[in-house]
Image (spheres, rainbow, N blue to C red):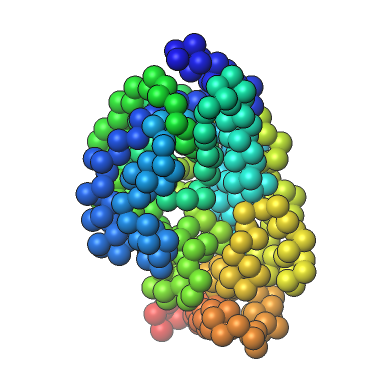
Amino acid sequence: MRQLVQDIKAWGMALGFQQVGISDIDLSQHEAKLQAWLDNHYHGEMQFMAEHGMKRARPAELVPGTVRVISVRMNYLPPDARFAKDLKQPNTAYISRYALGRDYHKLVRNRLKKLGEKIQHVCAEVAFRPFVDSAPVLEHAIAEKAGIGFTGKHSLTINKEAGSWFFLGELFINLPLPVDKPVEEGCGTCSACITICPTQAIVEPYVVDARRCISYQTIENKGSIPEELRPLLGNRIYGCDDCQLICPWNRFGQLTDEADFHPRQSLGSQQLLSLFDWNEATFLRNTEGSAIRRIGHARWLRNIAVALGNAPYNEDIINALYTRSEHPDPIVAEHIRWAIAQQQHKQSLAQETSRQQLRLVRSIEKGLPRDA
């Protein structure tokens, strides 16, 4: 068995995973916290989080016969990630780093399937099933038990040699393999992720209220984004990386070897107005094979409308918003009206500032007191 584990890890590395670990299936220590999270309705409208009850913490109920879980990580950080540069450009669309390239779900799952087949080739009686965000699985808890990393206060898995810029995947298996040791927690007294969160979604260490999370609002929420949160989204139109950008462990972030995870030219560092101009056919063409496509064109426009409302006043922005102000989707139309109102308010403030400056100049020219 120990030799097989070494082989499994070597096969995993050859398939493109940067780390492979083995976990048992006892996740009972997480059940009370999971139930409390659900009871507080922190899952928002993600009903799938509650539908499966405690099955998420009981792998053998999800896949009968499972006795171990093989956890893997795959880096996705591209060579030129730009990081916070786009966040500082209010007219540039910010898209979470993980979503700029090819959708990772199929890629990681296919690699996991190949790993399972390699194991099955030497152990014919082995049964396995791969998962990548496709079932009720406590992936971070499993990764922690498998030695992939520790769970940070932002609830993501952190590796002390690689930060947190990686995807996770799981292979449920019925083979009693030797397990790896968990990694010691490494956040200490640091609370940078809690402080930096634009919407204060990390309500306490290790607990995220999805309803306040920008990733939830721009991706999972199918309805209206709460008005009090809209200004806090800034130019983030799909996901948010702030808690990872600030994390000290990410100075050890490792670059990906997967060209598929490199940013697409049509998505990386694009102007908000350019993306807002896409019709549905253009959206579908430019997001083919991308995780972004799952939100659909309407939510895409909804998110960009909020970002345009948050941008500095620009007559081109107002004109672009008006061209879609009669959008047939009432949610999109409502967000566009909000964005127009935001731009008009900024226009009024700019005009008032100009008038004040003009009065000041005239008073100086006349030699009058500045407060005259």
What quarter of the picture does the N terminus occupy? top left
- Which residue sits at x=30%, y=45%? 206
Q: Is residue 135 visible?
A: yes
Q: Quadrant of residue 159?
A: top left
Q: Residue furthest bottom?
A: 326
| Residue 67 or residue 6, whichever sits in front | 67
- Report x, y in % for residue 239: 52, 56
Seen in the picture, residue 58 relative to 16 is either above or below; the reply is: below
- Report x, y in % for residue 306: 54, 71
- Report x, y in % for residue 45: 41, 68
- Which residue sits at x=49%, y=63%? 220
Seen in the picture, residue 130 relative to 343 is either above or below; the reply is: above
- Which residue sits at x=30%, y=26%? 184
Q: Residue furthest front?
A: 125
| Residue 54 or residue 319, whichever sits in front | 54
What quarter of the picture does the C terminus occupy? bottom left
- Which residue sits at x=55%, y=22%? 123
- Report x, y in % for residue 157: 41, 37
Number of labelled discs? 0
| Residue 21 or residue 306, whichever sits in front | 21
Q: Quadrant of residue 43?
A: bottom left
Q: Is residue 233 visible?
A: no
Q: Report whether 133 appears left or right of 176.
A: right
